[in-house]
Image (spheres, rainbow, N blue to C red):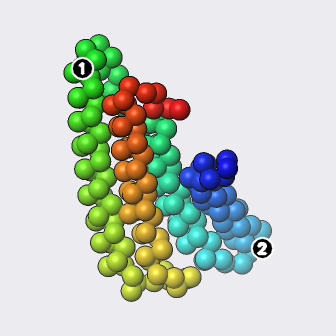
């Protein structure tokens, strides 16, 4: 059950592990074995992209993105509406990002990476995927906040 609950953390951690291993192998191959391993650079780049975008989704899940605390002095009724507006604007921004990420993913489907020769869509698909995840957590947190419940539980 814990795996199902923490799937995003596991996916982000897996991306980090792949990033570290590929970087380590790149150093070993290049400096110790004196054998070029160009595939490690591409794996590192892909793992880094996944780490960044899944990390952004984790930030949305746990509300760890940049925020302004000035609203604590605003009356509760006004604060509720201002926070909801902030969520709605964030959802709109991420929806536009996810849409154009999808367009970019589809347009890149015929391009391949130079070494691994895999479609660039595999690199770019993390943009719309993370956008959907972020929108889910923004809506979830907005509803919890609107109901007056603790968002971080």
Q: Which mark is residue 77?
A: 1
Residue that badge 2 annotates: 33
- The residue nearer to you, when weighing 89 against 107, is 89
**In the image, 48: left or right of 75?**
right
Task: Name the residue: 47% across, 70% down.
Answer: 123
Pointer 1: residues within 10 angstroms few (<14), some, or many (20+)?
few
Instruction: Please name whichever residue, 133 or 108, is drawn nearer the observer in this view of the structure.
Output: 133
Q: Residue at x 47, y 43 (%)?
A: 61
Q: Is residue 54 left or right of residue 25?
A: left
**Marks 2 and 1 in Cβ contact (< 8 Å):** no
Badge number at residue 45: none
Per the model, the C-alpha gap separating discs 2 and 1 is 65 Å
Residue 82 placement (x, y as % from top left): 23, 29
Can residue 63 be seen in this snapshot? Answer: yes
- Between discs 2 and 1, the one toward the N terminus: 2
Relative to 125, does residue 76 appear above or below in the rendering?
A: above
- Picture quadrant where residue 37 is located: bottom right
Q: Residue at x 40, y 38 (%)?
A: 141
Element type at mark 1: helix
Image vertical order of residue 113 relative to residue 70, above or below? below
Q: Quarter-wise, where is residue 86 in the image?
A: top left
Q: Position of residue 142 (x, y in %)?
A: 35, 37
Label 2: which secondary element: loop
74 vs 117, left or right, is left
Q: Image height check: is 102 above or below 111? A: above
């Amino acid at each position: 059950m814990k795996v199902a609950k923490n799937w995003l953390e596991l996916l982000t951690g897996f991306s980090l592990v792949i990033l570290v291993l590929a970087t380590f192998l790149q150093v070993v191959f290049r400096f110790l074995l004196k054998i070029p391993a160009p595939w490690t650079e591409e794996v590192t780049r892909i793992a880094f992209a996944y780490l960044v975008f899944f990390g952004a989704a984790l930030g949305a899940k746990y509300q760890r993105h940049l925020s302004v605390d000035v609203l604590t002095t605003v009356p509760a009724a006004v604060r509720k509406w201002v926070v909801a507006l902030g969520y709605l604007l964030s959802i709109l921004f991420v929806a536009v990002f996810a849409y154009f990420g999808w367009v970019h993913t589809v347009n890149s489907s015929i391009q391949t990476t130079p070494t691994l020769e895999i479609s660039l869509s595999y690199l770019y698909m993390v943009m719309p995927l993370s956008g959907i995840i972020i929108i889910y957590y923004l809506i979830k947190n907005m509803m919890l906040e609107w109901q007056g419940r603790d968002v971080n539980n």
